[in-house]
Image (tube, rainbow, N blue to C red):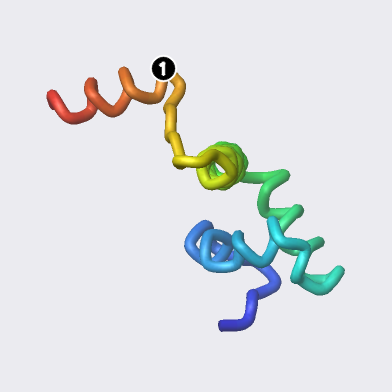
Amino acid sequence: MPLSTVPTCRELVDHLDQYVAGELSSVERSIIESHLHECPDCVEYLRGYVATIHLAKQSADRDPPVFSLPESLVQSILLGARK
């Protein structure tokens, strides 16, 4: 799906993998960055997305793969599960 000139948060998420991988045109990248400049929620989502990729790569590089989560993330997940 093409990226609109004023993307919604959902459209940004749909193109986030291409953005992080550097696969978007300069125009599409500029559109995404304009949205990120205006939307702190999407900036936070992007940070989490990049952190997840980083953790997955770290885990995959180990033999056998080991996955560890920051304690703050574990506590947030547990807190959310209790609600």
Judging by the rendered image, the residue that carries numbered circle 1 is: 72
On the image, the x and y values in percent for residue 23 come to 75, 70
In this rendering, is residue 71 above or below 58? above
Residue ID at (72%, 44%): 37
Quadrant including the N terminus? bottom right
Left or right, 76 with respect to 54, comes to left
Q: Viewer-proximal residue, 44 or 56?
A: 56
What is the residue that sits farthest to the right in this orientation? 26
In this rendering, is residue 79 above or below 64? above
Left or right, 75 with respect to 53, comes to left
- The quadrant in which residue 17 appears is bottom right
Quadrant including the C terminus? top left
Mark 1 crowd level (few <14, some 14–19, many ≥20, 10 Å Cα): few
Left or right, 38 with respect to 8, comes to right
On the image, the x and y values in percent for residue 59 come to 51, 40
Q: Viewer-proximal residue, 2 or 7?
A: 2
Say what amino acid the circle numbered 1 marks: Ser
On the image, the x and y values in percent for residue 67 come to 43, 34
Residue ID at (23%, 21%): 79
Residue ID at (53%, 67%): 14
What is the residue that sits farthest to the bottom in this orientation? 1
Callout 1: SS: helix
On the image, the x and y values in percent for residue 7 come to 60, 66
Q: Viewer-proximal residue, 75 or 64?
A: 64
Residue ID at (53%, 60%): 13
Number of labelled discs?
1
